[in-house]
């Protein structure tokens, strides 16, 4: 089975509940649509959570969010082939996988492309704080964008499922905006790029997180607390 849920930010209670209620197996997959929270503090602070997750009878596939380090910048991560694409993993925690942006995975016969990253609207608060982390590579780089577009070009701009952290600009659920944030200071370049991607793409389903809401806007399914079966 393939399950999907939204940002966990280190709180996996709903994942634990699902795993033990359905009796999952390690071949089952739980997709976290960014901000999983397992690479937030760095070693050794993140290790305790990873140890708890490593005994779960399920494989976690995490899309890169904006409130976490990129696994490719962490020395303990390696690459391997998994379900037709490349993922990042740590040998000590083989069931915790991070998708590589632009990779396409075969999930129960569905071709699913991963597109992670977003802008942190609380960026400046995080930069000023000594205890809250921020990373300058939170958004996809030009190289990542080119790689995503090249992969989609090779697929004839047709894909079954998009798994992203944020959403196309036109679908942003503005009612979820945090109070006190001046929107003119927010960098929407990733969402604007996803607008371009969506305008060219033929797809069946698009799932994203980031906005902490469970709703559908046009053809984009936003996920937070909900868990659904792909």
Image (tube, rainbow, N blue to C red):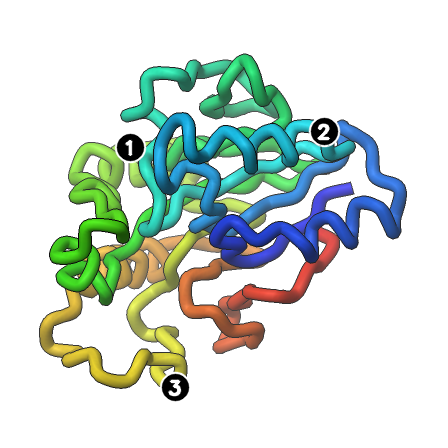
Question: Upstream in the sequence, badge 3 or badge 1?
Answer: 1
Dot 2: element: loop
Q: For the image shown, how many numbered marks are present on the structure?
A: 3
Asked whether 53 or 70 is in front, the reply is: 53
Name the spot of residue 140 as percent of width and height, x first: 25, 43
In this rendering, the answer to whether 40 lies above or below 66 is above
Asked whether 131 or 133 is in front, the reply is: 131
Question: Upstream in the sequence, badge 2 or badge 3?
Answer: 2
In the rendered image, the quadrant that contains the N terminus is top right
Q: Residue at x 34, y 50 (%)?
A: 67
Q: Quadrant of residue 110?
A: top right
Q: Residue at x 20, y 41 (%)?
A: 137
Q: Residue at x 83, y 39 (%)?
A: 24
Tag 1 residue: 147
Residue 179 appears in view: yes
Dot 1: element: helix
Tag 2 residue: 55
Q: CA distance from mark 2 to mark 3?
A: 38 Å
Classify residue 17 as left or right of residue 195: right
Crowdedness of circle 1 by 10 Å Cα count: few (<14), some, many (20+)? some
Q: Are marks 1 and 2 in contact (CB under 8 Å)?
A: no
Asked whether 132 or 3 is in front, the reply is: 132
Disc number for residue 175 = 3
Name the spot of residue 65 as percent of width and height, x first: 38, 48
Q: Residue at x 22, y 43 (%)?
A: 135
Residue mark closest to the camera, 2 vs 3? 2
């Amino acid at each position: 089975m393939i399950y999907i849920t939204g940002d966990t930010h280190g709180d996996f209670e709903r994942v634990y509940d699902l795993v033990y209620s359905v009796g999952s197996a390690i071949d089952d997959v739980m997709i976290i649509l960014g901000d999983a929270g397992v690479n937030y503090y760095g070693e050794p602070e993140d290790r305790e959570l990873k140890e708890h997750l490593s005994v779960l009878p399920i494989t976690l596939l995490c899309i890169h969010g904006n409130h976490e380090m990129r696994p490719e910048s962490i020395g303990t991560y390696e690459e391997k082939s998994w379900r037709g694409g490349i993922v990042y993993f740590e040998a000590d925690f083989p069931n915790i996988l991070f998708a590589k942006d632009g990779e396409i995975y075969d999930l129960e016969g569905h071709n699913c492309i991963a597109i992670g990253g977003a802008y942190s609207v609380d960026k400046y608060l995080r930069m000023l704080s000594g205890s809250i982390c921020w990373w300058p590579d939170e958004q996809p780089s030009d190289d990542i964008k080119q790689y995503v577009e090249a992969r989609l070009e090779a697929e004839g701009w047709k894909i079954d499922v998009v798994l992203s952290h944020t959403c196309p600009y036109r679908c942003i659920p503005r009612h979820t905006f945090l109070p006190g944030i001046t929107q003119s200071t927010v960098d929407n370049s990733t969402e604007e790029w996803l607008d371009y991607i969506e305008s060219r793409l033929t797809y069946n389903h698009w799932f994203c997180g980031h906005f902490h809401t469970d709703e559908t806007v046009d053809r984009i399914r936003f996920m937070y607390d909900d868990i659904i079966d792909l």
